[in-house]
Image (cartoon, grey):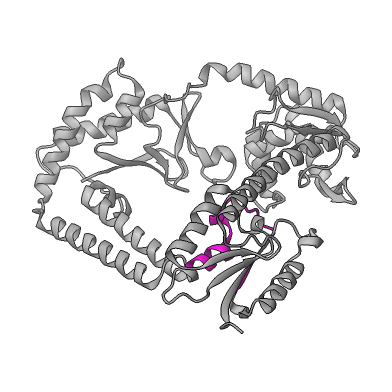
Amino acid sequence: MSDLRTAAAYIRVSTEDQIEFSPDSQLARIRDYAKKNNLILPQEFIFVDEGISGRKAEKRPQFMKMIGLAKQKPKPFDVILLWKFSRFARNREDSIVYKSMLRKQCGIDVVSVSENLGDDKMSILIEALIEAMDEFYSINLSEEVKRGMTEKAKRGGVLSVPAYGYTVDDGQYIPVPEEAEVIRTVFSRYNEGVGMLRIAKDLNALGIRTHRGGKIENRTIEYWLNNPIYIGKIRWTPSGKTSRNYHNPDSMIIDGQHEPLIDIDTWEAAQKRMREQKEKYRPYYKPMGSISHWLVSIARCGVCGGPLVNCSGYFYCNNRNKGTCPGNGSISVKKLNTIVLNQLRQVMDAPGYMSVPIKKPKPKYRENNSIIEQQIKKAYSRLDKVKEAYEYGVDTIEEYKLNKQKITAEIARLESEMKSEPESSPEEDFKKLQGLIRDAYATIESETALPIEKNEIAKGFIAEIIKTGLDGKEFDILYKI
């Protein structure tokens, strides 16, 4: 009898209803093989990923844990047993990379207990063919699932989690009375002229939440108003998600088998009003890569910290527009522009740094003002990641020590460089700020310069402009000095 060797087992199932390929049935086959081949299979070396696709290795935690252990020295096991090679990976690239690493670098073989290929040269070709067939099966299965869902959509069947207003029972959408009443109220109020933001705020005030427990936003209302499920229909897009494109030409609208919550006249009235609103505000839409005003992304709400957005000539808190910020303040674009330019001019013309109040950002913003500080911050982030890789079992202790040593040395070097830089005085910082403002002011004040150009220049010395108070009439400029 040959010497006993230690084995590990990797088991994977994509769904819980695959009884034939269940974890227990796979493990039974693997234990039987181990017993017949003088292999010890300790419980701690049995790795199981349930309900997980084999397309991407990094999304299988038990697989990655097994790989991490396999890289340890001395190796903890001699062979990894699988029910079939398809359990190891459905992606040829992952299969080749990890099998090659295990066999060549770790001295650990990978064996399928139901596809025993032997050790000759022909087995290499057969295993490669099996891998190609497994990947083909995975791709084909995805296409078949999409085709099956399309056929189900044509029959008006349930395709996804229920929309607000419904639950699912025995494969059918069933109205939830209290939620259905909310949906009817939303359509009714919108058709009466109430805005989406106002509706969202009122629902939040009543404590109403989405199925996932989130607050109601104006885009939530928009989604409900555009969801044909409420008139008894099913929307299905075979090419993928609609990405809020409710009129995607690839989408299918099919009669469902469920009870509608609103009548067709109410639905059509809501669609008409939404079209009219979009046409009304179309002149204010901005193309990609442009901004409406140079203060966009610089000015922020002092109540919730959200960005201020330019809407029809007024700056509002973006979260307020969603219905999630209690701030009520707004200010005209023209007025805010005047306030900021006046404050910049005061600093630019000041005789000394003590003559005008200069506010600096919190430390979290100041970290970005130094290239060295940015590099140190990234190095510490990498240090955390290599530690996590070791704790998760992806890296061995030797790999962790080496990576830690390299990153720690890099941090020490960067900190040494930062300390060697002479610290500037408040007077010098103020003079530098004045110079930056003088260089930028003519462009920022110009009526011909593009907003995006002004924005980029302003970000060179302005960290943030904070709207203070609920009325939104006070503004503090935080400078990068």
Residue at (14, 60) in percent of width and height: 416
| Image x and y of residue 434, in percent | 15, 36
Q: Judge whether residue 50 can be spotted in this image.
A: no
| Image x and y of residue 406, in percent | 26, 63
Numbered label tally: 0
Q: Nearer the viewer, residue 22 or 232?
A: 22
Left or right: residue 218 versus residue 168 is left
| Image x and y of residue 306, in percent | 46, 43
Residue at (47, 48) in percent of width and height: 304
Left or right: residue 232 versus residue 367 is right
Placement of 1 over or under 192, stated as above or below: below
Residue 351 found in image quarter: top left
| Image x and y of residue 129, in percent | 63, 47
Q: Nearer the viewer, residue 303 or 286?
A: 286
* 50 in magenta: yes
Placement of 322 over or under 363, stated as above or below: above
Residue 432 found in image quarter: top left
Residue 281 found in image quarter: top right
Q: Judge whether residue 70 can be spotted in this image.
A: yes
Placement of 81 over or under 341, stated as above or below: below
Left or right: residue 6 versus residue 304 is right
Quadrant for the N terminus, please.
bottom right
* 71 in magenta: no
Residue at (35, 67) in percent of width and height: 399
Left or right: residue 83 versus residue 4 is right
Q: Nearer the viewer, residue 49 or 472?
A: 49
Q: Nearer the viewer, residue 211 or 140?
A: 140
Which portion, as a residue range, is magenta? 46-68
